[in-house]
Image (spheres, rainbow, N blue to C red):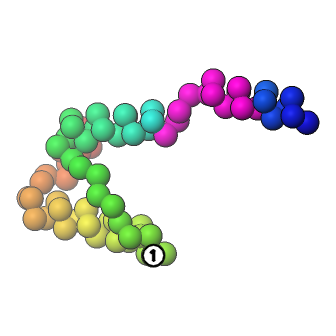
Amino acid sequence: MEEQRQLAAQEAIAMPDLNEQEQTAMQKLFERYGLREESVRPDGNCLYAAFASQLNNITSNKVNCLYFFD
């Protein structure tokens, strides 16, 4: 059993950090389009809160939404 734990730990070390890869890819897009990441309170309505926040940013900055769909 201990041998399996050690083997699993070694495999875990060798695996790519998918979270880091995702963060790097997102950061490149943020920089490309002049965006930033914002935290939204996880209250069960966070999807709607995030959407509303983005709409507020778009309208307050007068960003052309079509720009992001090139």
Q: Is residue 17 above or below residue 63?
A: above
Residue 17 rendering spot, x and y as whole percentages: 53, 33
Amino acid identity at mark 1: Asp
Q: Which residues are magenta?
A: 8-19
Q: Secondary structure at mark 1?
A: loop
Of all residues, the one furthest to the front in this rendering is 2
Residue 1 rendering spot, x and y as whole percentages: 91, 36
Q: Is residue 51 above or below residue 64?
A: below
Name the quadrant of the C terminus: top left
Instruction: Name the one closer to the observer, 34 or 10.
Output: 10
In terms of secondary structure, what is the magenta stretch mainly? helix
Residue 11 rendering spot, x and y as whole percentages: 71, 27
Q: Dividing the picture into quarters, in which one does residue 47 lie?
A: bottom left
Question: In percent of the image, x 63 and y 28: which residue is there?
Answer: 13
Residue 22 rendering spot, x and y as whole percentages: 44, 38
Question: In percent of the image, x 37 and y 34: which residue is there?
Answer: 24
Q: Is residue 56 magenta?
A: no
Q: Dividing the picture into quarters, in which one does residue 32 lie?
A: top left
Question: In percent of the image, x 29 and y 34: which residue is there?
Answer: 28
Name the residue carrying label 1: 43
